[in-house]
Image (cartoon, rainbow, N blue to C red):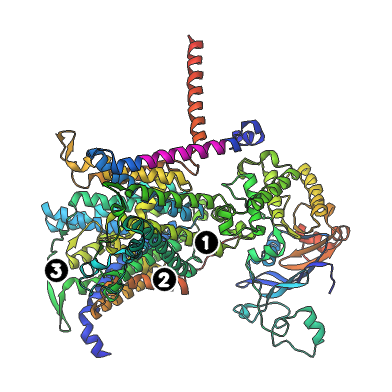
Amino acid sequence: MFKKINNALNPSLRHPLDEQNKRTNKVALMIFLAIVYVFAILLDNVLPANGITLMLIPVLRKGAIYALLCVSMNLLNGFTGLFSLGQAGFMLIGGYVYAILTIPQASHAAVYQYFDGGIFQFSVTEVFGNVLGPFLGNVIGAIICIIIAGLVVAVFAALIGIPVLRLKSDYLAIATLGFAEIIRAIFQWNGIGGITNGSNLLRKYTNLDNLVWNVGSLNINFGTTFAFLIVTLCIVAIILMINSSYGRAFKAIRDDEISAEAMGINLFKHKMLSFVISSFFAGVGGALLAMFQTTIQAAAFTSAMTYEILLIVVIGGIGSVSGSCIAAFLYIACNEWWLRFLDSGYLGSIPVGFFRGGFRKVIFSIIIMVIVLFFSRGIMGDKELSFTGLLNKIKQFKNRKALKQAAEKEGE
Amino acid sequence: MSDFIQANLPYILAGISVGGQYALIAIGYTMVYGILRLINFAHGDVFMAAGLIMIFATASLPMYISIPLVIIATVLLGVVIERVAYKPLRSAPRMSVMISAIGVSYLIQNCALYFTGGLPRTYPAIPWLSDSITILGATTKRVTAITPILTIILVLALVLFIKKTKVGLAMRAVSRDFQTSRLMGVKIDTVISMTFIIGCLLAAIGSLLYFTNYQSVTPTAGAMPGLKAFVAAVFGGIGSIPGAVIGAFLIGIVENIIKGIGWTTFSDAFTFVLLIVILMVKPTGIFGEKNTDKV
Amino acid sequence: MDKDIVLHLEDVTIQFGGVVAVNNLTLDVPKGKIIALIGPNGAGKTTAFNCITGVYQPTNGLVKFNGETIVRSHPTGQMKKMYAGKNPLKYTAQYTLDKYDENEEKERDPYVFTDKIIDPDPDHVTSLGIARTFQNIRLWNSMTVFDNVLTAKHLRTEQNLFSATFRTKPSEEKRMREETLALLQEQGLDQFKDDLATSLPYGLQRRLEIARALATKPSLLLLDEPAAGMNPQEAAELCDFIRDIRQKYDLSIFLIEHHMDLVMNISDYIYVIDFGSEIAEGKPAEVQHNQKVINAYLGASDE
């Protein structure tokens, strides 16, 4: 307590993030992203396909998509303080809108085999492909369909938000969960099977591996790059918004609704903005997930999926964008790759009896519980990761080490 | 009307039965919410775990040992969850406790996945309860007829317990005002444990009845009944036991009638439509009390 | 109607169930003056504040701000059965004409012959130019001192979501930041600007709350027990501080306070309420010697 006050009263103890640091961080981030993009292209095309790269590609793609999904959920739960559990429902709509719009005309009969080839008889990517060639057509068509998917979800969210956002914390959670379940039921209803294909899955739409550029004899795959590009753009937009006047208003609502309202922040309007924006990106994430999975089925978008994303957000730190991103990649990497051996029955080459199907998930949930109970701030708390921050940490660590050594020497 | 009842009798009977089973789960939700203001997302999974314990118990033990064992194990599970996952967070924000509940739910489901290998397990037939009987010309299992009666007896016993005993008085005091009760010397931890004991006891009984009817247990089998029971609790006014019971019967019956009409896809969605409607029209539920924030 | 009256409360009654928290309170806050509302604990002072700022809807009565009715209610709504006030039908269409001059009344309240209820949200009231502080400090805990004030400027920002997000109007953001810094400087808070609001000492937190309220550019400031928990020296400083900001921002100030030295020192006019009803009003010196007020504070009976 005293330390806190002392800290407050002594300006020399504070480290404000000044302009210089900000610029350094920006440059560092740019360099980092450039490396990531170069690596993504190399990974998709140049690097030899072995055990590692074959795992790395899906992990990076899914990790990026989950990063966006987590950041969009964090915007709502972490930055605006609205405990919403509708994420899976919004992802479902986004994924379906995207898939429906991009199934090639020729494949309609096969995909909608129980519904006379479906109602829509066009594919946006094909329409663009006819004009711009298959690669550009696929890329531009996909981007347009992703945006449409996000917008459709945003409209849905606005409609749902009108009644739901007046509810208080846990009622809001359960109402959004309810809406997600209703959406899932509607999309599985055979009555609109001409559009959604009922309870059957949608497939053959433009997916990440269709984004291949044929230059002469060269085939350049842009799958991973595309996913990263969309995710980066979205997360940058979210970060910009969080740091704007509106983002501050969201945080004010999270910290204290009553004083936020008393300071002239219209609660309903701002909650709605946050809800709609978060849902827009959830829809974009859903569309990307559909692209990644190559097939999509409404039955998979259960509340368990929402819980999974929520728990990743908690691991990363509620209220930290960088935390969400780090946690998403870690989670996906562990889940899909690093902890796979737990399910295999072997530790190295030694057979271990209890290492069988599902053991990975058990370990996982125990880790999550430990984080929730003992490290409730997660990886980043509500702080953001930055280059200069990292440098400072390293410096502090070195200083401490040096001091320790000096103290030890003195002791001698 | 009588034609309608005649035609739908099997569904109505099934609805009443399922309603009773939901009611037994819903009480656990509503009591925990009344006292801790926590949606115990793990409660449905405790219910599922009770089903699995029964399957594993009957594999090697006779029925008359298995049933009490299931009830005791479920109650223990509930108390352990409370002690480990909720108690340390008593002064934390509500969102953290809710996240912890979601985490517990995830853990139980994954453990179940591990132990069952992801395959649905067949629930043992409990003699007498599983026997077929005929009611008003409709053939059904005896459990269908027993459930509503048993539910009502248990609920009455519970209401008496809360009205007449000292622990019941303490429960009512805590649900009214947590902090003041604590200051007045109510042993808060005992009361909360008691709440979980009652909730899990009823969930265990509910699971015996429910799975006798449905016969198979999967790791996610508890999620949907759990959510429905929670909606029932919200419908009745969360914190109110009679409200939860009425809500549960209503949901059970309507859901089965919808199935009877042939709209099976929407039988689950109906529950949530009901939830949304009740939250819009009367967020505090039919028997709920209003509380306001102080400025 | 006096043009110099900034805030006017008329017959404001607020009931919660059977409890009358505020009973037919009528008062005026003239422009540029400091008016105090005092009374024992539980007298209904904060409830009156909450009614002005739109948190509670009154059972009956109206609130005017700069001559414009901003809150208006009447007991024919859902609270009719419980209404225990003096003028049950005064704000309804059943209003009896023969008692009053029609034109005069219409000028007083344009909605006088209608059943119109005006029940604004708190943010709307703030946007009209009424800002408040809270009895139990309600700062935004996760934000720095600087961000607390900057966020309050959101109400008057000219950026929309797009221009704010994509920084298409950097000058506006710059202006907001500069104004915030200026505000903090004159409150003497600029050296703490990068600290968390909650890490400030208590007295400074109160000051920060006032700075935050000023950031919404109010013309009327409502202060709910600004000196609570302060020592006499801090309270004396606060006194000068309130006078300064009144001068500087051309404010009218309406405050609730228990600190009698402060109230007597600073106020131009004082209203005293007890059990929701007004028991006295007047200049500080008059109120100080009013027997009813002394009785209310010392707990003696009225005879």
Residue extending farthest to the front is A216
The amino acid at mark 3 is Ser
Mark nearest the camera among 1 and 3 is: 1
Element marked by disc 3: loop
Quick check: A134 left or right of C212? left
Q: Which residue is mark 1?
A: A273
Q: Position of residue C293 (x, y in %)?
A: 80, 61
The amino acid at mark 1 is Leu
Q: Which residue is mark 2?
A: B276
Q: Position of residue A82 (x, y in %)?
A: 48, 58
Q: Chain ID for label 2?
A: B
Q: Which residues are magenta?
A: A21-38
Quick check: C256 left or right of A179? right
Q: Which residue is mark 3?
A: B130
Q: Position of residue A324 (x, y in %)?
A: 42, 46
Of residues C162 and B199, the one nearer the viewer is: C162
Q: Measure the alpha-carbon separation of dots 2 and 3.
A: 36 Å
The amino acid at mark 2 is Ile
Q: Residue at image x 51%, y 68%?
A: B290
Q: Which mark is residue C102?
A: none
